[in-house]
Image (cartoon, rainbow, N blue to C red):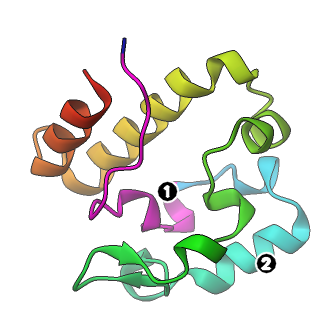
Amino acid sequence: MATWCCVKQCGACCHLDPAERPDLETYLSSEELELYLSLVGEGGWCVNFDHATRECRIYSNRPRFCRVDADVFQEMYEIEPEEVNDFAIDCCRQQIEGVYGDRSLEMLRFDREVGI
């Protein structure tokens, strides 16, 4: 069974381009939406994403909407805790495909790490 995990040095989720996420207002509060939009930098990448190391500079203090957590997913997306694993895997795969491609090294690494 595949088990979600964050794959270091991927960063696909750090590509925040609002044009690619038209439903932001559906699951973010107005304050979170304002914060989200303030984080969007050049090319749609989060201003806290370090392109050299491909890691988040504020990972331990990242916003709620950047966290994969059962409580957060239930509140934001109405996903039941027992569905979070599969939902998170699907979200990551979609984001990785959109940013890097479905046959990218990032996708291959993610699939290997989660057990697909």
Residue at the far top in the pictured view: 1
Query: Which region is colored magenta?
Result: 2-20
Q: Read off the residue under disc 2.
A: 34
Residue 15 in the magenta stretch? The answer is yes
Foreground: disc 1 or disc 2: 2
Q: Is residue 112 above or below residue 66?
A: above
In three-dimensional space, the C-alpha distance between marks 1 and 2, rounded to whole angstroms, equals: 17 Å
Helix, strand or loop: magenta stretch: loop
Residue at the far right in the pictured view: 30
Left or right: residue 17 versus residue 50 is right
Q: Residue 102 — which label?
A: none
Q: Read off the residue under disc 1.
A: 20
Left or right: residue 35 versus residue 89 is right
**Residue 84 in the image: x percent, y percent?**
62, 27
Q: Quadrant of residue 8?
A: bottom left
Quarter of the figure with the N terminus: top left
For marks 1 and 2 on the same chain, the one whose residue lies earlier in the sequence: 1
Task: Say what secondary structure mark 1 lies in.
Answer: helix
Residue shown at the point (19%, 32%) measured from the top left: 112
Residue shown at the point (61%, 60%) measured from the top left: 66
Name which residue type carries label 2.
Glu
- Mark 1 Cα within 10 Å, few/some/many (few <14, many 20+)? few
Task: Say what secondary structure mark 2 lies in.
Answer: helix
**Residue 19 in the image: x percent, y percent?**
53, 63
Q: Quadrant of residue 87?
A: top right
Residue shown at the point (49%, 84%) measured from the top left: 48
Residue 18 in the magenta stretch? The answer is yes
- Front-lying residue, 13 or 60: 60
Q: Is residue 77 above or below residue 51?
A: above
